Image: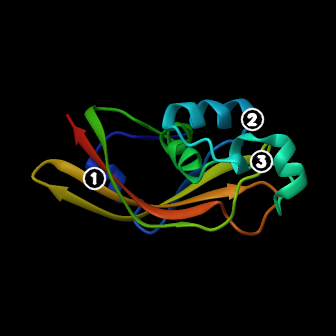
Amino acid sequence: MLTINSHDEFATFIGKEIGVSDYLQITQEQINKFADATNDHQWIHTDVERCKKESIYKDTIAHGYLTLSLLPFLWEQIVEFKNIKMMVNYGIEDLKFQQPVLVNSRVRLRAKLKEIKNLRGITKTFMESVLEIEGSKKPAFTATVVFLYHFV
């Protein structure tokens, strides 16, 4: 795991891959809980038997936003920040869901620092983020994720 202590240290990674998280398996229980939390119970996510009969995937798939919501957890496996008061999820640019994530698939985050700015002492980063699916050439999604870091 990479440790970053300051804006200047972070800036040395512009254009470089920061790292790759461990794989995380997406379970039906996670999908069902996400459906409950978001009131999105569309059958392609929650109805296993119907999916076996009617879905082109023959299994349930994770909500796209469930996979996106894993980003902070997976990001914390890649880098540890020291000397910060706060980190804020600021935004997402150019998000493209490229392939569904089938239940029991394993996903991981690959992150690259695209750009960094110093906004009067607040570090604004633009991270190229790719959620890879184990065994698949196409990722679940690609996006530029924007974080704000308040270093001490």
Find residue 68 and report its horizontal and vertical position in percent.
53, 49
- Residues 61 and 137: in front is 61
Q: On the image, numbered disc 3 is attached to which residue?
A: 60
Q: Position of residue 134 (x, y in %)?
A: 78, 54
> In the image, 69: left or right of 126?
right
Give the mark nearest the N terminus, 3 or 2.
Answer: 2
Depicted 38 relative to depicted 63: above or below: above
Camera-near label (1 vs 3) is 3
Q: Looking at the picture, which amino acid does disc 3 mark?
A: Thr
Residue sitting at x 74%, y 35%: 27
Disc 2, SS: helix
Question: What is the secondary structure assignment of the residue under circle 3?
Answer: loop
Disc 3/disc 2 C-alpha distance (Å): 8 Å
Q: Mark 3: few, some, or many residues within 10 Å (few <14, many ≥20)?
A: many
Q: What distance separates the C-alpha of mark 1 from that of mark 2?
A: 42 Å
Residue at the image position 56 percent from the left and 31 percent from the top: 36
Asked if the residue under mark 2 is in contact with the one under mark 3, i.e. CB atoms within 8 Å, the reply is: yes
Front residue of 9 and 89: 89
In the rendered structure, which disc, 1 or 3, sits on the residue that comes first in sequence? 1
Q: Which residue does the numbered mark 1 point to in the structure image?
A: 8
Q: Disc 2 marks which residue? A: 28
Which quadrant does the N terminus fall into?
top right
Q: CA distance from mark 1 to mark 3?
A: 45 Å
